[in-house]
Image (cartoon, rainbow, N blue to C red):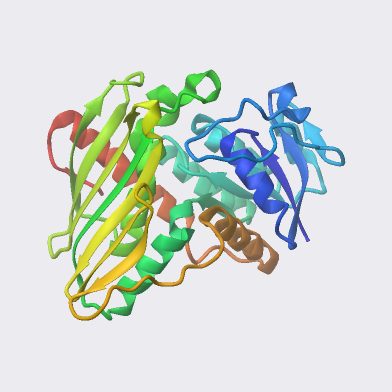
Amino acid sequence: MIKVGIVGVGFMGKMHFNTYNAYKRCKVVALADHDPRKLAGDWSTIGGNIADKRAAQVDLSGLKLYSPPAELFKDPEVDLVDITLPTFSHAKYAMAALEAGKHVICEKPMGLSLAECDRMIAAARAARRQLFIAHCIRFWPDYKVLKQIIASGRYGKVLSATFWRKSLTPTWSWDNWLLDAKRSGSAIVDLHIHDTDYINYVFGMPQAVSSSGVVGAVSKGGVDAVVTHYIYPQGPHVVAEGTWALAPGFGFTHGFCVTLEKATVEMDCRSGKPLTVHPLKGKSITPKLPKDDGYVSELKHFVDCVAKGRGSDVVTPQDARNALAVCLAEERSVKTGRVVRTR
């Protein structure tokens, strides 16, 4: 039984808390947050871009509760610390937990700079502990099956691929930190990074990016909308769009359309279109998807890795660093109007 301590009770902290409690190989034994109301079980103020109708008042009896959060790292019962704090706190708290001898799961993005990522990787190596970065789209059912379809070669090579992720403006964060680019990295680093990481996962790191976007429409100095062409000299043609500048009534959507030599594969959550394969010949196919959503699949995988004493073979800390590197190149491309190399 892996015993988990969650640091940060916000949207992702709540999601992770509910996921762990549904998995028999782990148990949440401790929570930490700066807000005494959340430690008292009042989670009514937690918001996010994905609907979650679970209870706003949570029974936390039997759990150890810590404030300030760093006190949790001293708890000898905790095997695995899950960092779900705001992005600007990721490196600080992940490194402290590693140095205290804990394995660490850290929400994406890994950090705000490549230097932060490098320090986190070095801390994990020095402590001989596992560091996992929660890039959940690698585990999301539709995207997981899409990668399998592409890797199988059944429909030939990919010719072009388009991905999108669009959200209402995130006005729900504590102290409005999401809309402060210096603390969140803006829509590119917080939201759009999901698709950038997945593109890296499936196609490898692009040689360069060419991006355009909107700066400062809803945030303080951030890129609030971006469209990027990921440059692979030998193909395929890959484009992704990300925005959090949409009106509240729009809500949230994501999806993709991938054209291979012998088929087109699409998914659009807004229209309710499930993952569908349209072969050049024959009828369209709706593949069966794994039953677990990305959060569940991801956290089960990380817990299993800790139980087996190994790192992840799905997403490594270096993978998370690479995703941030490409996103930062996209940001430079938006702000300079130039093609920017990714390394």
Place residue 71 in its image quadrant.
top right
Is 338 placed above or below 202 here? above
Q: Is residue 224 left or right of residue 14?
A: left
Q: Residue at x 86, y 38 (%)?
A: 61
Q: Residue at x 64, y 51 (%)?
A: 127
Q: How many marks?
A: 0
Residue 75, position in %: x, y? 80, 42
Q: Is residue 154 left or right of residue 93?
A: left
Q: Nearer the viewer, residue 41 or 221?
A: 41
Q: Residue at x 71, y 56 (%)?
A: 22
Is 326 placed above or below 40 here? below
Which residue is the extreme one toward the right? Answer: 62
Q: Nearer the viewer, residue 93 or 33?
A: 33
Is 184 placed above or below 289 here? above
Q: Nearer the viewer, residue 227 or 331?
A: 227
The answer to whether any part of residue 203 appears in the image is: yes
Residue 235, position in %: x, y? 15, 63
Residue 228, position in %: x, y? 21, 44
Place residue 60 in its image quadrant.
top right
Residue 298, position in %: x, y? 55, 57
Q: Residue at x 23, y 34 (%)?
A: 332
Place residue 68 in its image quadrant.
top right
The answer to whether any part of residue 98 appears in the image is: no
- In which quadrant is the N terminus drawn? bottom right
